[in-house]
């Protein structure tokens, strides 16, 4: 191991050492050199976010749906359907997911990309790597760090310039890096799955739904997209119907 990496490991507790060493091993197993891993972990912008002092409030889905189907919100969605008609039409034809559903997903997730998040995504998952109590959780964070680093390497992008939600979700469709790697789709044909590109975001959302049982169980597929059934599937379908999709 490089001296600089060894020096870094000495700064952390034995528990954190185990996790950082695991991250380094995963990076090197997925095509990164030790020097590249060192550069990420030695970057002065690397930080651990403080614990959240205010817990997120429970989502009131009936209120969310009421706002979604309000006239101005529906007009906003109609403009999106017109603006991205060609991309939505191709995604609908290829995957069999209604364009209104895809528009509804990016509306609910990020207000069509306007609220995609402001947190440095690498630091979000790095914080989870070091702070999570459960092994399954911190290894999940390591997987997302590796996937994020792989995306940044392919895109030629600085990892610390990538920003997303407080949970680490990226772009208009709010994909986690690991999920993007598994379900992402190159919608614009540039040989890069980019969560911040609207075409890739729409095609990736459609691909995720199809791979998670959309044809057999649309509500279940939408629940998996959100990570919880809750009221999310109802919200997406209510907005899709407000945009003109026939009731299911």
Image (spheres, rainbow, N blue to C red):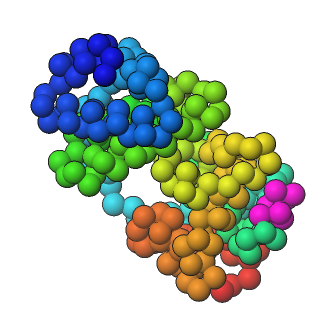
Q: Residue at x 66, y 52 (%)?
A: 201
Q: Nearer the viewer, residue 94 or 59?
A: 94
Q: Residue at x 27, y 32 (%)?
A: 20
Residue 40: tell me if it is visible.
no
x and y percentages locating residue 149 in the rendered image: 50, 35
Q: Is residue 17 left or right of residue 164?
A: left
x and y percentages locating residue 158 in the rendered image: 55, 24
Classify residue 116 by image quadrant: top right
Q: Please identify the quadrant where the C terminus is shown.
A: bottom right
Magenta stretch encompasses residue 19: no
Q: Please identify the quadrant where the N terminus is shown.
A: top left
x and y percentages locating residue 13 in the rendered image: 13, 28
Query: Disc count in the image?
Result: 0
Residue 190: tell me if it is visible.
yes
User: With respect to residue 144, does 161 lie above or below?
Assistant: above
Q: Residue at x 57, y 38 (%)?
A: 151
Q: Nearer the viewer, residue 116 or 128?
A: 128
User: With respect to residue 10, does 116 lie above or below?
Assistant: below
x and y percentages locating residue 113 in the rendered image: 63, 45
* Span colored in magenta: 85-91
């Amino acid at each position: 191991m490089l001296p600089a990496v060894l020096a870094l490991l000495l700064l952390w507790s034995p528990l954190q050492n185990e996790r950082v060493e695991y991250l380094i091993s995963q990076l090197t197993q997925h095509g990164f050199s030790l020097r590249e891993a060192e550069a990420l972990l030695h970057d002065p912008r690397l930080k651990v976010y403080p614990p959240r002092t205010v817990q997120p409030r429970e989502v009131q889905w009936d209120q969310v749906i009421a706002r979604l189907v309000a006239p101005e919100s529906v007009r906003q969605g109609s403009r999106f359907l017109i603006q991205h008609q060609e991309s939505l039409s191709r995604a609908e034809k290829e995957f069999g997911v209604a364009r209104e559903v895809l528009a509804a997903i990016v509306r609910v997730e990020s207000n069509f990309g306007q609220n995609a998040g402001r947190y440095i995504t690498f630091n979000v998952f790095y914080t989870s790597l070091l702070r999570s109590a459960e092994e399954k959780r911190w290894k999940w964070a390591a997987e997302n760090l590796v996937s994020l680093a792989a995306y940044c390497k392919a895109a030629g992008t600085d990892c610390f310039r990538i920003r997303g939600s407080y949970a680490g979700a990226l772009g208009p469709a709010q994909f986690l890096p690991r999920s993007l790697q598994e379900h992402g789709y190159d919608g614009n044909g540039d040989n890069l799955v980019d969560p911040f590109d609207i075409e890739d975001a729409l095609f990736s959302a459609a691909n995720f739904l199809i791979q998670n049982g959309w044809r057999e169980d649309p509500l279940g597929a939408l629940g998996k997209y959100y990570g919880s059934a809750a009221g999310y599937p109802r919200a997406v379908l209510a907005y899709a119907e407000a945009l003109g999709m026939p009731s299911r």
